[in-house]
Image (spheres, rainbow, N blue to C red):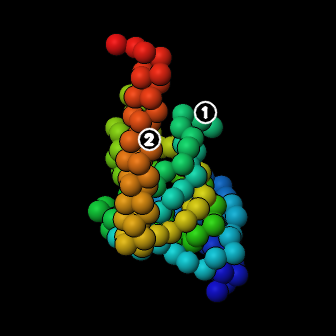
Amino acid sequence: MRTCTAICLVFLMAHSCSNPYAGYAVYEGIYYKLLKIGEQDKYARSGEYVTIDVTCKTMRDSVFFSGVCRFGLTRPEFPGAFAHCFALIGEQDSAEFIVPATSGFFEEALKTPPPEYLHSSEEIKIAVRLREIQSREAFLRERQTFLRWAADAGEHERHLLREYVRNAKID
């Protein structure tokens, strides 16, 4: 299945005549180039959570964000929405996308408005490696476990601080 998908993507990229970006195919208004096909055959769906390595660049390849993001996928609300990207890659795949700066990526994934220096008419490149896909239930379990750990760690830190104050005889 993965090999068939890769062959179809290469065919589409080779035959996209009106495409202004050499080497990229187009899907729902998003230009994309598959960089690496992972070993998994698992694709994310709306309602699931994804963890991605992401690098955002201007069209001249100046990096303005690089990091790891985790967020819940929603149904794409408009053509060119960043959520469409996840219909094209599976778990452990890597791809580069060219999307409008107003694609919703910043609001969906980064929970922030786009940088002021990006004009609404500009496009950006987003390189993504899909690390992991989680069900909503698995995500919530993991989150709850982390919150319990954080609460326990906080209580431990308060205990250590009280001990220090007591032993140092600080008023």
Q: Which residue is mark 2?
A: 156
| Secondary element at image label 2 | helix
Residue found at x 44% / y 52%: 149
Contact (Cβ within 8 Å) of mark 2 with mark 1 = no
Residue 148, position in %: x, y? 38, 55
| Secondary element at image label 1 | loop
- Compared to 99, does 17 lie above or below? below
Circle 1 packing at 10 Å, graded few (<14), some (14-19), many (20+), is few
Residue found at x 70% / y 64%: 36
- What is the CA distance from the residue labelled 2 to the residue labelled 1? 43 Å
Give, as a three-letter code, the residue at label 1.
Ser
Residue 29, position in %: x, y? 44, 60
Q: Is residue 57 left or right of residue 87?
A: right
Give, as a three-letter code, the residue at label 2.
His
Which of 36 and 132 lies nearest the eye of the viewer?
132
Q: Which residue is mark 1?
A: 62
